[in-house]
């Protein structure tokens, strides 16, 4: 053994070949944490000293190769400023350069994910052999960063500027076929033959059959582009990348800039440029938020896994009541992810609609080559449409998704309770009705809770799991386990009107209603909020949700929280509702919806809605962008703080993730609490006070005032 550590080891094989194996002790994956980086350096010392090595093989002892840097280490290093960031980056850059400069050839066997730093170390090798199940990629932009260990230097020298810019700016994982086509790897082989194939290749290179020096030369030299080619390549790429990413996500453009400024330089000079761009990216609020988001996402996943472990059994059979928009979507998702599901409705038309929806979604996957026709058949077979309760006695979880009417739901829930076994868990997908009130007539309320999916089910990641007063821990655990199995992000919250997400969304809509009442143009509000980062502004969002659905939910919220959400004026949504404009679903709401060339609804603003609103609103006037943002965001933020203080949600991280997964809160802001921390609570309280005449929704909570006074933050990082 040449080197033996806790993260990696190096041993001599036959014929002067050494094998460096990454295998991080006590972890399920390999990553470049400080320990690995430091041991990699020590291992290179040993390799350089050995003197009798003819070739080096890099392998992994895990199912993955290396998944990237240890993101938990970023926070500390990034807050230490440019020197701290450079310090974190330098040692591994040095390692990869040393690997690339070894006086003998190197080959890597990429057996699983090789992402970020994991792929960058592969690019430092002379030859890359990839397993047929592995994936490679440089996903740093997803964290608001750029590759910092030579990715923007070596990848364009290996695959060309265009492909490199595309891969890095999109941050996508690449499958073996794409990697091979791009010449990012030299061969793809079945997983069980990978190590043998890589070793054989290395022996051939070591024997002089293949020229590794030439490859190194290319990686270490400027890229041979003439000025016109370069101008064309970078000009168009930057414009395209900038437009795709949007102004709130600067790092994809920074990555292309790094390639552009370094292409005429040799490796070491280009690496310096990369580091400058990395540091600039790492210091943005976007990177801070996105790195924080990654950690919060992990925390939410851990909490959900913790619940799953507490479940008395695995979820093997499910059922859904109601085959409408939501029931059909739930059946599809369950079947797609492998859990057989009965889909019950009271009429055949409903069932046909539900099945059609599943069929459409699956056909699209088949058309795009992402699923075979036989797999599609298997998935459809997992959905069992039915008009009766036959076979409901061995179902693990039933999801009720019938019409949003308390009387109907009570009847359906008590009925199904009589058809299932005594331990079956029953969950309602209600969006507004209190879980405790739905549980009232049930004989086993401990087995009952809320499982609130978002529309469209296959796309929206969040499932709010709502525990009622009497819900048992096991019922929560089973439903979270089911959500996990469906590939969803489950967040457990307590019962209250609107639960968590709608409870804070409707105050935001109330902010919108007051703005329009006071003379704001709904189109201006939409534009400003979209620029702030929301996927759609509030008027457009209401149209998409459905004005009728929105008005109904507003009433529920007004009854639940009359002191803050009670109605005192005719809101713009009421005006639309009264005029029969229900939004996208019937072609007109705030906007009118026409079909674009691909048959998708396209919104157009017409005078009609302004005319309808006129009698109910003040004369139209321009609002400052900041005023719009503040008047929209203060009600949402204070209501979310109230939910945290009341224990509706357990932690700021879960609350932030719920809004990101559930309603698309701008991810680059890290969530509402992260945003509050970034502007400072004392500042927030001052902003809210400017609007105190708008009513109780603009009143910061006692907890917020206390935190503002004592300089505290939600994430405790001040
Ligand atoms: N549509 C959304 O955006 C959305 C989002 C989240 C939650 N929800 C909630 O999901 C539930 C369903 O909403 P939807 O939009 O899918 O409604 P929908 O009208 O599309 O579907 C309801 C289905 O329930 C069926 N049904 C009625 N009574 C039944 C009974 N006794 N047994 C079995 N089936 C019965 C109907 O035939 C219909 O097919 C509601 O509680 C709603 O609040 C809806």
Image (cartoon, rainbow, N blue to C red):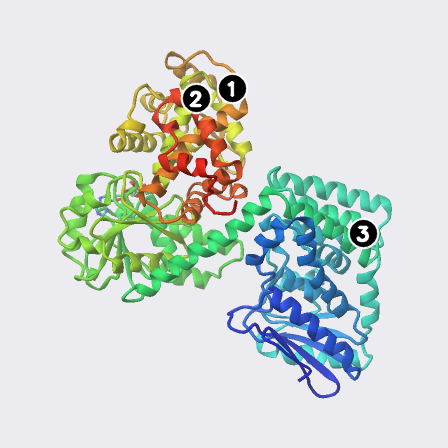
Count numbered badges in the picture. 3
Vertical side of 387 occupied by 519: above or below: above
Q: Residue furthest right?
A: 226
Residue 103: % across, % down? 81, 75
Between 18 and 188, the one lying in front of the other is 18
Residue 704: % across, % down? 40, 36
Classify 10 Å Cα crowding around label 3: few (below 14), some (14-19), many (20 and above).
many
Q: Are marks 2 and 1 in contact (CB under 8 Å)?
A: yes
Q: Which residue is mark 3?
A: 263
CA–CA distance in space, label 2 to label 1: 9 Å
Residue placed at 48% from the left, 38% from the top? 676
Quarter-of-image position of residue 50:
bottom right
Q: Residue furthest bottom?
A: 14
Q: Which residue is mark 2?
A: 515
Q: Which residue is mark 1?
A: 623
- From the viewer's perspective, tell me whether residue 152 is left or right of residue 111: right
Q: Is residue 129 visible?
A: no
Picture quarter with ligand 1: top left
- From the viewer's perspective, tell me whether residue 183 is left or right of residue 586: right
Q: Earlier in the sequence, mark 3 or mark 1?
A: 3
């Amino acid at each position: 053994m040449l080197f033996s550590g806790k993260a990696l080891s190096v041993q001599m094989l036959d014929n002067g070949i050494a094998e460096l194996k990454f295998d991080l002790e006590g972890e399920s994956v390999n990553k470049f944490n400080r320990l690995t980086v430091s041991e990699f350096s020590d291992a290179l010392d040993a390799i350089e000293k050995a003197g009798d090595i003819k070739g080096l093989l890099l392998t992994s002892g895990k199912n993955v190769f290396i998944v990237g840097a240890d993101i938990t280490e970023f926070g500390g290093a990034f807050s230490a400023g440019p020197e701290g960031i450079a310090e974190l980056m330098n040692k591994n850059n040095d390692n990869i350069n040393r690997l690339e400069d070894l006086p003998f050839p190197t080959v890597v066997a990429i057996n699983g994910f090789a992402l970020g730093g994991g792929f960058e170390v592969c690019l430092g090798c002379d030859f890359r052999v990839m397993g047929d199940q592995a994936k490679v990629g440089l996903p740093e932009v997803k964290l608001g960063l750029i590759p910092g260990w030579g990715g923007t230097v070596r990848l364009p020298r290996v695959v060309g500027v265009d492909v490199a810019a595309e891969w890095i700016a999109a941050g996508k994982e690449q499958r073996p076929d794409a990697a091979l086509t791009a010449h990012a790897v030299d061969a793809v082989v079945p997983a069980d033959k990978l190590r043998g194939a890589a070793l054989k290749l290395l022996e051939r290179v070591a024997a002089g059959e293949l020229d590794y020096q030439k490859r190194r030369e290319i990686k270490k030299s400027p890229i041979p582009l003439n000025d016109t080619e370069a101008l064309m390549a970078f000009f168009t790429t930057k414009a395209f990348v900038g437009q795709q990413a949007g102004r709130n996500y600067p790092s994809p453009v920074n990555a292309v800039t790094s390639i552009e400024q370094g292409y005429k330089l040799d490796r070491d000079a280009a690496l310096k440029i990369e580091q400058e761009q990395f540091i600039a990216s790492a210091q943005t609020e976007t990177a801070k938020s996105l790195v924080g988001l990654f950690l919060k996402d992990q925390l939410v996943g851990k909490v959900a896994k913790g619940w799953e472990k507490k479940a008395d059994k695995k979820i093997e059979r499910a059922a859904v009541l109601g085959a409408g928009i939501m029931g059909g979507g739930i059946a599809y998702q369950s079947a797609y992810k492998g859990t057989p599901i009965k889909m019950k409705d009271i009429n055949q038309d409903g069932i046909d609609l539900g099945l059609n929806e599943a069929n459409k979604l699956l056909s699209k996957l088949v058309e795009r080559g992402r699923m075979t026709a036989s797999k599609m058949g298997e998935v459809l077979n997992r959905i069992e449409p039915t008009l009766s309760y036959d076979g409901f006695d061995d179902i693990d979880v039933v999801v009720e998704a019938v019409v949003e009417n308390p009387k109907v739901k009570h009847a359906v829930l008590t009925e199904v309770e009589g058809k299932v076994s005594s331990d079956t868990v029953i969950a309602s997908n209600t969006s507004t009705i209190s879980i405790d009130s739905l549980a009232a007539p049930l004989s086993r309320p401990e087995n009952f809770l809320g499982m609130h999916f978002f529309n469209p089910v296959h796309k929206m990641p969040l499932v709010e799991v709502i525990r009622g007063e009497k819900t048992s821990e096991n019922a929560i655990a089973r439903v979270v386990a089911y959500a996990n199995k469906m590939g969803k992000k489950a967040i457990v919250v307590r019962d209250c009107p609107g639960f968590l997400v709608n409870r804070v969304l409707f105050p935001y809509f109330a902010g919108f209603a007051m703005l329009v009442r006071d003379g704001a143009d709904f189109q201006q509000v939409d534009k400003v909020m979209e620029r702030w980062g929301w996927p759609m502004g509030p008027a457009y969002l209401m149209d998409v949700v459905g004005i009728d659905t929105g008005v109904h939910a507003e009433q529920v919220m007004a009854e639940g929280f009359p002191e803050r959400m009670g109605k005192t004026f005719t809101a713009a949504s009421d005006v639309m509702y009264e005029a029969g404009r229900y939004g996208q679903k019937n072609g007109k709401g705030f906007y009118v919806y026409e079909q674009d060339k691909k048959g998708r609804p396209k919104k157009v603003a017409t005078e009609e809605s302004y005319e309808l609103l006129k009698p109910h609103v003040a004369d139209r006037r321009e609002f400052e962008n900041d005023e719009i943002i503040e008047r929209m965001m203060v009600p949402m933020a204070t209501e979310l703080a109230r939910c945290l203080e009341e224990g509706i949600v357990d932690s700021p991280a879960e609350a932030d993730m719920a809004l990101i997964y559930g309603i698309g809160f701008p991810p680059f802001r890290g969530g509402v609490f992260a945003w509050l921390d970034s502007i400072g609570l004392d500042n927030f309280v001052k902003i809210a006070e400017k609007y105190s005449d708008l009513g109780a929704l603009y009143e910061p909570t006692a907890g917020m005032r206390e935190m503002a006074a004592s300089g505290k933050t939600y994430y405790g990082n001040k």
